[in-house]
Amino acid sequence: MIKVSNSLIIAFLAFTLSSFHPFYLGVTHFKLNSKSNTLETSVKLFTNDFETSLKKLNGKQVDLINGSNKEELNKLINKYLQTHLIIKINGKIAAFDYIGFEIEKDVTWVYVEYKKISSLKSLDIENTLLYDCFDKQTNIIRVETAAGEQNSKISCPEKTVKFSFK
């Protein structure tokens, strides 16, 4: 009986203490759309963490959920992504068109698009999203093409991942 009680206490303490060490996770998904020759990209980040990084860039508080000036928020997010999500498509640096963002519960989805992508032989990604504020940040990267899906994970301070397609 005492062993069970001690086990329960240890389990309770481990669960309670784990809440003081949050995890930092982002997901970036690239999907090749062969009909429109675009690489559609979505980025999923926890809103409070993203606001922290945007505040650091902006020098003032950022509220993605209740922010009244969407145009200013879009410019800030675009500027942030320009320096923290850099890709090379088939060996050449690619620029994206910023589409926008939306809030879903406690996460923010950001959408960008790379145009005029007729073939995808290689994709080199430098993803440092939220590294500026969270040294335990992990970013999962998914790439989806007609041939299938490839996945990778990088954790701060790792910055780059490469994908090859045949």
Image: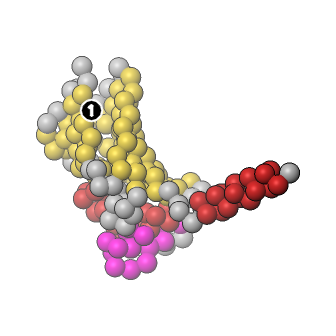
As drawn, the residue found furthest toward the left would be 92
Residue at 33% x, 55% y: name it: 156
Residue 55 percent location from the top left of the image: 38, 73
Residue 82 percent location from the top left of the image: 25, 57
Up the image or down, 30 lies above or below 85; here it is above
Q: Nearer the viewer, residue 122 or 37?
A: 122
Q: Nearer the viewer, residue 91 or 139?
A: 139
Residue 25 percent location from the top left of the image: 46, 52
Please state if 18 lies on the left or on the right of 134 as rendered: right
Reply yes or no: does residue 33 show up in magenta: no
Residue 96 visible from this viewpoint? yes
Residue at 78% x, 51% y: name it: 3
Q: Nearer the viewer, residue 2 or 36?
A: 2
Up the image or down, 65 lies above or below 29; here it is below
Tag count: 1
Reply yes or no: does residue 61 show up in magenta: yes
Q: Amino acid under label 1? A: Phe
Residue 14 percent location from the top left of the image: 64, 58
Residue at 36% x, 37% y: name it: 152
As drawn, the residue found furthest toward the right would be 1
Please state if 92 lies on the left or on the right of 107 as rendered: left
As drawn, the residue found furthest toward the front would be 2
Q: Secondary structure at mark 1?
A: strand
Residue ID for mark 1:
163
User: Which quadrant does the C terminus fall into?
Assistant: top left
Q: Nearer the viewer, residue 70 or 81?
A: 81
Residue 84 appears in which quarter of the rendering?
bottom left
Residue 31 visible from this viewpoint? no
* Color theme of the render: secondary structure
Q: Which residues are magenta?
A: 52-65
Residue at 39% x, 63% y: name it: 134
